[in-house]
Amino acid sequence: MGEILKVDNLTKRFDGLLANDRISLTVSEGEVVGLIGPNGAGKTTLFNCIAGYHSVNQGNVFFKGKNITNLAPERVCREGIARTFQLVKVFNEMTVLENVMTGAFLRTRNRRRAEDKALEVLEFIGLYDKRTLWAETLTLPDKKMVEVARALASEPTLLLLDEALAGLSGAEVNQAVELISKVAKKGMALLVVEHVMEVVMPISDKVVVLDHGAKVAEDKPEAVTNDPRVIEAYLGMKYAAKHRTN
Ligand SMILES: Nc1ncnc2c1ncn2[C@@H]1O[C@H](COP(=O)(O)OP(=O)(O)O)[C@@H](O)[C@H]1O
Ligand SMILES: [Mg+2]
């Protein structure tokens, strides 16, 4: 599997606060990488740096070998990186279909083609029946799925999900996990920020752990779960005890 995303020594400061401290990581084609860490660890900041919403202070982001550091969000998206937002940003005054079409318009100016693409994605994601509803009438889980659909409609090769599953019920989480697997099977790579450990571990090929802005681990899910530094930083003894294999 070829490497498509390479974050190299990335540093982001907010005034005196070191939100991302020399972070390096890679994502390969079709790989699902979980990005975990306690609140305030710097996960969303890293997404924002990769996707061009923040300028970085130091370091670089390479995508498919091209240096995309500090490109504007739309340029980054055009290169093939799409993202969702931790605080959902659907267009309330648009229908579900129109929301998803805004993603498709990144690749075409033709309204008909954008609509076809959006409908195809809505079908794939299970929101086809809600396509004519105003986005503001949706539940939060459905709004999150509209964001995922909008991201997918821009035909990304790398999808960044920022807590897309937070607030979902057990059954909804299962559906979403299935969806993530389905997306990965299409050959798309995913970088998934998630708080629900039980969700991240089984779907991830690799897990990157941040704590206080720095990377403290990058390994297979089982290895990360048993890493004392990670347990201390984040997981808590309860989770580790429940999942310990040795
Ligand atoms: N736009 C911003 N301006 C100032 N500080 C910020 C900004 N965004 C995030 N931070 C700070 O950076 C740190 C990392 O935040 P964030 O990346 O949102 O963490 P996470 O997503 O892991 O919970 C936190 O201390 C947060 O308060
Ligand atoms: Mg966050």
Image (spheres, grey):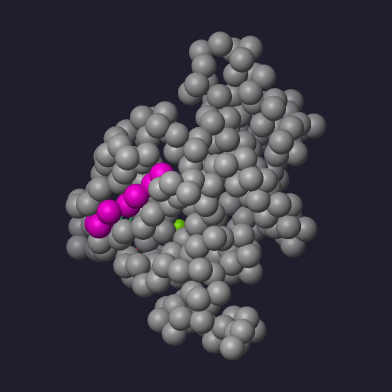
Count of all numbered marks drawn on residues in the image: 0
> What quarter of the picture does the C terminus occupy?
bottom right
Q: Ligand 1 falls in which quarter?
A: bottom left
State the residue at coordinates (63%, 12%): 112
State the residue at coordinates (55%, 65%): 195
On screen, residue 57 versus residue 221, left or right, reads: left
178 up-or-down from 123: above or below:
below
- Residue that sits furthest to the front in the current view: 1
The reply to whether residue 158 is in sight is: yes
**Residues in magenta?**
4-12
* Magenta run includes residue 231: no
Give the x, y percent position of residue 243: 62, 81
The image quadrant of residue 95 is top right
The reply to whether residue 235 is in sight is: no
Give the x, y percent position of residue 132: 74, 25
Give the x, y percent position of residue 191: 49, 52
On screen, residue 233 versus residue 69, left or right, reads: right
153 up-or-down from 114: above or below:
below
Of the pair 212 and 80, the residue shown nearer to us: 80
Q: Main secondary structure of the magenta part?
A: strand
Of the pair 157 and 11, the residue shown nearer to us: 157
Of the pair 32 and 239, the residue shown nearer to us: 32
State the residue at coordinates (64%, 45%): 185
- Residue that sits furthest to the right in the current view: 129
Give the x, y percent position of residue 226: 51, 81
36 up-or-down from 226: above or below:
above
State the residue at coordinates (52%, 52%): 31
1 up-or-down from 13: above or below:
above
The image quadrant of residue 75 is top left
On screen, residue 212 versus residue 186, left or right, reads: left
